[in-house]
Amino acid sequence: MFKRILIANRSEIAVRVIRACRELGIETVAVYSDADRESRHVAMADRAVCIGPGPAKLSYLDQEAVLTAAEITQSDAIHPGYGFLSENADFAEACAKRGIVFIGPPPEASRKLGFKSAGKAVARAAGVPVVPGTKSDITSDVSKEVADIGYPVLIKASAGGGGKGMRIVREPGELKAQLEYASTEAKAAFGDGSVFIEKLLERPRHVEIQIAADKHGNVVAFPERDCTVQRRHQKLVEESPSPALTPQIRRDMQDAAIRLAKAAGYQNVGTVEFLYQDGKFYFIEVNARLQVEHPVTEAVAGVDLMELMIRVAAGEKLPFGQERASEIRCHAIEHRINAEDPDNHFMPCPGRIERLELPGGAGVRVDTHAYEGYTIPSYYDSMIAKLIISAGDRPAALRRSLRALGELKIEGVKTTASMHARVVAHPVFMGGDFDTHFIEKTGLLDEQRKETRK
């Protein structure tokens, strides 16, 4: 087992890694930017190293600064968390060259799956269903190919997600201009303007399968997470199990995820994402890292994914097989509480938290780095906390969510907490029959703004 792990990240995920390491008897090193000097992860770690100024490209994305910090602290391994360098195959390779273990997939697996178009090629070869689309990134006129696919179609960035570089095209005359817009946006967001096209599914659910794979060829897939409730292609609420899936679809989806992982030579934890509509599922991408919403799976499956990924990186075998991984022990829902203004297109709202009261009680978990008096920097993701609710069944989880959201008090910055309460209480969400356009179709944003103006 490792003696010391450097955490190449910040905020609540850095806190999460520190806690797991402490339970395993592993020392931790935090890295931080000038803007994060007062962050909780800095105070919690055994050691802390400043690696640069506030902007991420000058600190958390500075590979040399991170690697140097690992060397001077004699860290055995680096945990990248999510975002930043977590899916950077070059960084994983650089770690190996310096004799430092990268806690994540091997570089070759990341390269096979890191670009969406490449991942779809692996999926096709493994017999995993994919959304009809272009076979590779676009390098020439594809108007005829798109006509064969059939409008409407969706242009997507190959190198990233979160809605960046994404455009809907409903008519042939829109294709050329939208391709240029999507490529330009992708280049600005990810440093790579590569895009591809796939058939637009009008009423999909976004469902993902958490996988874990060791260095000995063993792969397991956990129960699904339903991440259908989104705004601007960003996840808002995640739950497991999905109210839409049958046990047979769940098994088929898990089998597909395992085939894909084995075909790519995947190791450690990761997430295989699918779209689901009309009883059929289609592979869309792999997130070759830990997901923000991993606590949902931890609650439902009764596993510690953070501990698992550290043990696997250290060379240990998975401690259980697929039968154990498939167990569903409760219903879980995660609420991402962001410092954003729902009344103003979810505009980030950095600033000082003047009051913070966190919910508690049975079945309530809060992952956060924030505290009363903490100032949220303007440089990074706006998430303040993750509220993870678990209960015996979905109705009980919804009731518990409303109770916990009612107990949550945050003052000084605007947050999305009230929007989460509206989602959970909405009859359509309670009924379980919704798609990725739920927020727009139900007019929840308009209701939120009307209530705020009263």
Image (spheres, rainbow, N blue to C red):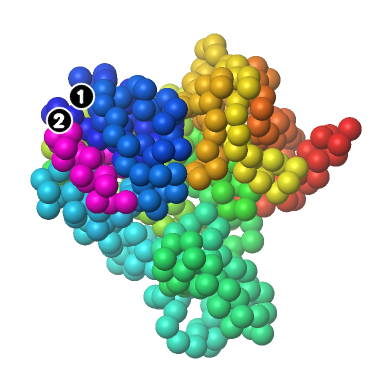
Alpha carbon distance from label 2 to label 1: 7 Å
Q: Magenta part of the protein: which range?
A: 62-84
Q: Relative to 246, is 392 above or below?
A: above
**Along the viewing direction, whichever of 398 and 410 lies nearer the viewer:** 410
Task: Give how far across and how far down residue 294 sits, in percent.
Answer: 42, 35
**Do the residues under discs 2 and 1 have CB atoms within 8 angstroms?**
yes
- Judge whether residue 235 can be spotted in this image: yes
Q: Quadrant of residue 303?
A: top left
Earlier in the chain: of badge 2 and badge 1, it is: 2
- Residue 2, which numbered label? 2
SS category of the residue bearing label 1: loop
Q: Quadrant of residue 149?
A: bottom right
Q: Relative to 361, is 370 above or below?
A: below
**Along the viewing direction, whichever of 160 and 141 lies nearer the viewer:** 160
Magenta stretch holds residue 71: yes
- Residue 26, which numbered label? 1
Task: Give how far across and how far down residue 342 sits, in percent.
Answer: 71, 41
Q: Amino acid at mark 2?
A: Phe
Q: Is residue 21 left or right of residue 300?
A: left
**Along the viewing direction, whichever of 406 and 39 lies nearer the viewer:** 39
Residue in view at x 32 percent, y 51 percent:
62
Q: Quadrant of residue 26?
A: top left
